[in-house]
Image (cartoon, grey):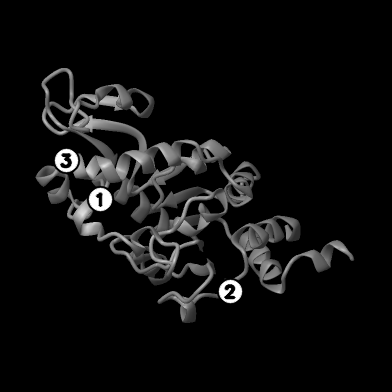
């Protein structure tokens, strides 16, 4: 088998788009982390929200109403996320940046895996598990330090003011970080090529970023299994395994 036969025609087309682009940005969702053993949110049978109502455990009102229940759901998840490692899809995007072919990664993921894979410019529009903050005084705590803050009721409590400590991730009912969204908007408005990886592109306001790019004349590439609202707008869509497809793109470059 020749090298040319090891990657799909779609990967070849996407590689060509990357070579032609002066400014390429990647927009990633939960699907890019599935190969690392992190389930996505909505896949039937395996999605995180398959057996739990997100508005009962992942809404800002739920955090304040029953903080112990919130942490009962989130604490094991945070421990799980902390043990996961980047996969070859994360590595491929980091390699594109190293080669000067990718300007930045805008991600909906909170798992820090893009940074751990070596990506330098990462815009985390939904926050990160890296830190938690007190909702009263604003004191910040690294993820590794949060375990010592839990009281006998299972609530992470700030030792400075006894306020409730919350992960620095965006919950339902919260606005996305203004600075992060400003960066994301500027990157998408200024790119020639937007590559959407592992996202259903259905959750707003992030789902509006492809429209910003398209309205400014950028090309759109989608590397995602399953349909998205932007499939007809995409110059190329790759629907295979995200690791295989991105490795194929690297090989085609």
Residue furthest bottom in the image: 232
Q: Secondary structure at mark 1?
A: loop
Mark 3: give few (<14), some (14-19) or many (20+) Cα within 10 Å.
many
Residue pointed to by mark 2: 236
Residue pointed to by mark 3: 67
Q: Secondary structure at mark 3?
A: helix
Nearest to the observer: residue 172 or residue 127: 172
Nearest to the observer: residue 2 or residue 209: 2
Which tag, 1 or 2, sits closer to the chain's start? 1
Comparing marks 1 and 2, which lies closer to the viewer? 1
Nearest to the observer: residue 184 or residue 69: 69
Residue 119 horizontal/vertical position (percent): 54, 41
Q: Quadrant of residue 72?
A: top left
The alpha-carbon separation of the residues under discs 1 and 3 comes to: 21 Å
Residue 181 horizontal/vertical position (percent): 30, 51
Residue at point 19% right, 51% down?
Answer: 174
Q: Are marks 1 and 3 in contact (CB under 8 Å)?
A: no
The label on residue 176 is 1
Residue at point 79% right, 64% down?
Answer: 6
Residue 129 horizontal/vertical position (percent): 36, 38
Regarding residue 153, the answer to whether it shows in the image is: yes
Q: Quadrant of residue 235?
A: bottom right
Q: Secondary structure at mark 2?
A: strand
The alpha-carbon separation of the residues under discs 1 and 2 comes to: 29 Å
Q: Is residue 29 left or right of residue 99?
A: left
Q: Is residue 51 left or right of residue 230?
A: left
């Amino acid at each position: 088998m020749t090298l040319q036969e090891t990657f799909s025609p779609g990967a070849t087309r996407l590689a060509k788009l990357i070579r032609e682009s002066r400014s390429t940005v990647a927009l990633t969702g939960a699907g890019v982390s599935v190969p690392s053993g992190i389930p996505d949110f909505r896949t039937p049978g395996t999605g995180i929200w398959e057996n739990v109502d997100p508005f009962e455990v992942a809404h800002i009102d739920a955090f304040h109403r029953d903080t112990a229940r919130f942490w009962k759901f989130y604490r094991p998840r945070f421990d799980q996320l902390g043990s996961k490692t980047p996969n070859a899809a994360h590595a491929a995007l980091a390699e594109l940046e190293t080669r000067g072919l990718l300007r930045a990664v805008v991600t909906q993921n909170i798992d820090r895996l893009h940074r751990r894979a070596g990506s330098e410019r990462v815009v985390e529009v939904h926050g990160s598990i890296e830190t938690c903050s007190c909702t009263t005084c604003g004191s910040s705590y690294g993820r590794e330090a949060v375990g010592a803050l839990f009281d006998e009721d299972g609530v992470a409590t700030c030792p400075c003011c006894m306020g409730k400590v919350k992960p620095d991730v965006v919950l339902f009912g919260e606005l996305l970080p203004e600075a992060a969204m400003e960066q994301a908007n500027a990157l998408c408005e200024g790119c020639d090529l937007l590559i959407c990886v592992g996202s259903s592109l259905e959750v707003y306001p992030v789902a509006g970023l492809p429209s910003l790019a398209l309205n400014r004349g950028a090309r759109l590439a989608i590397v995602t299994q399953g349909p998205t609202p932007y499939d007809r707008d995409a110059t190329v869509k790759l629907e295979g395994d995200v690791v295989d497809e991105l490795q194929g793109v690297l090989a085609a470059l």
